[in-house]
Image (cartoon, rainbow, N blue to C red):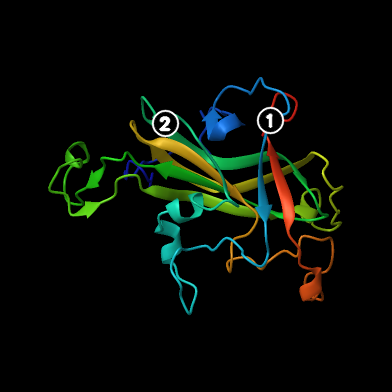
Amino acid sequence: FFTGENQWRKLSQWPLANIQQKSLYLQANGKLDFSKPLSAGSFTEYVSDPAKPVPYTEDIHFERTINYMTDDQRFAARRSDVAVFETPVLTEDLTVAGPLLAKLVVSVSSTDADFVVKLIDVFPNDFRYEPNAPSEHRRVPTATYPMGGYQMLVRGEIMRGKYRNSYEKPEAFKPNTPTDVNFSLPDIAHTFKKGHKIMVQIQSSWFPLVDRNPQVFTDIYTCDDKDFRKADIRIYHDAQHAS
């Protein structure tokens, strides 16, 4: 089942045999592009504070919900500790099928940090969803569910930074030094429709889906409150350090 287009497809194999790998690069000023950045010394910076972690949903709940998977991600995009990048409006449908690879170049002011990467489908501002209408008639003024500008979470995954090279041998970050953090996100089958945009959000907490990282290289399960500290996070996007 391909989300976005909401269609079933019968495939002879998975992953697909004729898959074409594409790189989508982070750019300055919150942009995304399929071309590698040419600028020098370009990065996006935010402060990650374990005392004020990025929540996984906008609402407050007593128990973990399953609805977070369809929650509008605009609540996160508005936060200063979430880096947001998006493409221009797509001029044609774009189908993505198979695994996603996040290849980040980052630096942290401390010795550890988490990195959450979220792939998001941004709907047009004038989008209106009529659930029982054919796909070509879904933008109608009498729509039941207004979804203009909806930021749909397609996939999200986290990498605890100290395990970036090995789960058996954790490594501290060298403070303020550009470092590769590469990891796989689960497979997807999604079509970004014409008129939509592709967005990537990067953050360093996802509470309480993932326990808070004290952002120092330590044993999280034996540390205490004094070990938790803020960290300056940089996500690089230049010719030498392309993410």
What is the x, y in percent for residue 134? Answer: 18, 42
What is the x, y in percent for residue 173? Answer: 84, 50
Q: Amino acid at mark 2?
A: Leu
| Element carrying mark 2 | strand
- The residue positioned farthest toward the top in the image shown: 38
Residue 209 drawn above or below residue 235: below
**Residue position marked by numbered label 1 in the rendering:** 42
The label shown at residue 94 is 2
In this image, 68 relative to 140: left or right?
A: right
What is the x, y in percent for residue 123? Answer: 35, 42
Q: Give the residue at x 42% y 43%.
A: 121
Q: For marks 1 and 2, give the one nearer the viewer.
A: 1
Residue 40 drawn above or below residue 84: above
Residue 189 drawn above or below residue 90: below
In this image, 35 relative to 70: left or right?
A: right
What is the x, y in percent for residue 128? Answer: 23, 45
| Element carrying mark 1 | loop
Task: State the residue in front, 237 or 185.
Answer: 237
